[in-house]
Structure formats: structure tokens, C-alpha cells
Amino acid sequence: MNKIRYFDHAATTAVKEEVLKEMLPYFNIEYGNASSIYDIGRKSKRAIDEARSKVAHAINCNPKEIYFTGCGSESDNLAIKGIAYVNKEKGNHIITSKIEHPAVLNTCRTLQNEGFNITYLNVDENGLINLQELENSITKDTILISIMFANNEIGTIEPIKEIGEIAKKHKVLFHTDSVQAIGNVRIDVNRMNIDLLSMSAHKFYGPKGVGALYIRNGVNCCKLQDGGHQEKNLRAGTENVAGIVGLGKAIEIAYQNFDEYNNKLINLRDYYISKVEEKIPYIKLNGHKTKRLPGNSNISFRYVDGESLLLNLDSKGICASTGSACSTGSVDPSHVLLAIGLEDELARGSLRVTFGDENTKEDVDYLIRSLIEIVQNLRNMSPEYLEITK
């Protein structure tokens, strides 16, 4: 059986050993409910508070501004709907972009169905929003701007500090989905004028099923679920103590090892891109050449179907992802790739490769060799390709 070579770290990451070790006692030793007043309950409460401090330190905020959730999607929902509902008497206009994660886009569509006015900003061929278009879109009814920090598919990093300055100038709240950015970009919510920020542990070597939301002190946000008074009455439900501890440890490690880790990813990414560009014709790199996440590469292969490419890579023990999403039995091209101007055929032939801690240059060489072989085999079955190479 082929050795598994994992190149899909934007989808999820393995829990680090140090993270797992820190989590384990909270499953069966320090198992107290953090809302209880006896000793093992207080120990769980202290563990949550310590994790809260670690998250706050990573993004330069007060621990009291951190709220734990079940995932990044819940954090996005709580931020956007929470701000929309609490401010609906003030205004009903929200600004976002066309390349947001579905957790943001579908939340905005739900609000749109409830009578909110949503502006979906265009992006350029690199996936960047236009700051002037953003500012021109602000009206007296605008209550929130929600722009992702870095795109999950093409890796483009948005001008977050400049967006924050525009939002502050017009007294509009600014939320950013930072699920892909945490651990890969240095974030200072105060310097960047960010009012709300979403994250998810499993993108930076923490466990699945736990996320966090930063809400600037003084910003009012409406709770979305009824129940107990956990998380300062904003997010009801018994706390996932082990998961929260894991998130805290994972984000601590991410920023302790930030430079070494990200320099490694940049080297692997640039090596991979240069070799693919050198050895495989009829390709297109998607996303900004330099303003992109350290470990992200998204390349479209003309005359190749992305799903077929993935299946062939899987047969060689390679895990990656494509720019297509299966829905209602059909394969639709990525909304992100269409938004940056790719035609359907090229969008369907995209391959996202995202590097991580365990990847080596030898792994990347194996990926490149496999790609050269697979792409050529698939193109040999394409009438369009055979026509142009006669």
C-alpha cells in the first residue's frame, strides 16, 4: 500500500502530540463540569481560562474578549447574525465579498431572506477586493463589513489593516473569518482595527469541534441559542473543556514556532509551484503570487478534470483537493475560481495543494512526479488536447 502523503492542510490538520497530551486528562481525570463550584469543576474552569488567555495573547486582545464555540462556522454565524440582529434598528446593510467561505456566504443569504441588504464585493483576478469599491459601498444603513483574512481555496491574503481603517473611519463594525490565517499570519486585532474574528482549532493542529470568536469589548452581539449562561451568556451549552484546552495549546505552539514553520511552508510551496510551471504546460496559478498563505498552492490544469486528477492522486497515496464541490449530484466549479474570472473548464481542472508540518521536499518531489504522469495520461484522453498537439 502506498505511503499516505497529505497535502490538504487547508481542509484539516492532525492534532499535534503536545496538544493531545494536554487534552487527555480532561476526558477522564479532570472531567468536571466547568460550571460546577466543587474542585474538579473549578479545575476545568481554570483550564478554560488559561486557554482563553493563550488565544488572546496570539491575537493581542483581552482574554475577556474571547468566546469559545463549536467551530469556525458557528463563530461566523454568531458574529454576523449576532451583529445583524442586535443592530437591525440602526441599519440592515452588510458588506461581504463573493469569495467568502460558505459559512459566511450562506449566513448572509439567510439574512438576505430575512430582509437584510447584502452587498457582495467583486474581486480582481488575484482574489483581492477593491478598497475603493468597498468604501463606496458603505451607506448610512451599513452595520457590518465581513471580509475573510485569507481565502481557503486560492490563499490570497486580503488587505485587512486597510479594511479595518475604512470600517473605523465610517463607524462600521468589521468581522473577519480568519480560519485559514491563524498560525500562518501574524494578527493584531487592535492594530488592524478588527472588531470580530473567527477561528477553528483543527486548521492549526488542534482538535475538530472547537472554535473561538473574538468580540471587541463594547461591541454588542446577540446570542443565537438559548440555554445556560456559559461564555458570558453568549453561547449556551456545556463547555468542551478538552477541545478548548487543545485549541489553546495549539495556538500557543503555532505562534511560538511561527517563523520556522512558515518559512518551511514557503520554501515547499515555491519549490512545488516552480517545478510544476517548469514541467507541465497549459497551467495557471490561481491567487496572488506573493500575497498568499505560506502553504497554499492552487493551480488549474487545462484539458484535465479535477475530480479525475484527485482520484488518480489518491491511488498513489496523495491527498489534495480540487476547486469543485459536489452538490445535488452534480459537480459545480468553485465559486471562488469563477469570481476571479476563470472559465468553467479551467476552474474544474484546478488542484489545491496545501502544505504542512510533516511534509518534506521528498514528498513534494513524489507529488510532482505523480502529477506529471497523471496529467499527461488524462490529457491523452482529451479530444481538445489531442487536437492542439497534433
Image (cartoon, rainbow, N blue to C red):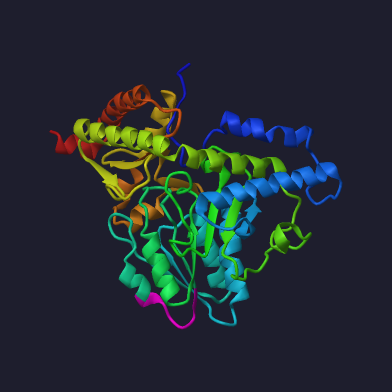
User: Could one spot residue 12 in this view of the protein?
Assistant: no
Q: Which residues are magenta?
A: 136-143
Instruction: State whether residue 325 is above or below residue 78.
Output: above
Q: Residue furthest right?
A: 38
Q: In the displayed structure, does residue 287 sit left or right of residue 240?
A: left
Q: What residue is rendered at 53% in x and 38% in y? A: 253
Q: Does residue 285 show up magenta in the picture?
A: no
Q: Quadrant of residue 107?
A: bottom right
Q: Nearer the viewer, residue 176 or 84?
A: 176
Q: What residue is rendered at 52% in x and 36% in y? A: 13
Q: Nearer the viewer, residue 70 or 55?
A: 55
Q: Quadrant of residue 67?
A: bottom right
Q: In the displayed structure, does residue 90 sit left or right of residue 280?
A: right
Instruction: State whether residue 63 is above or below residue 48.
Output: below
Q: What residue is rendered at 57% in x and 33% in y? A: 15
Residue 194: image x %, image y %? 48, 63
Could you tell me which quadrant the C terminus lies in? Answer: top left
Residue 310: image x %, image y %? 40, 34
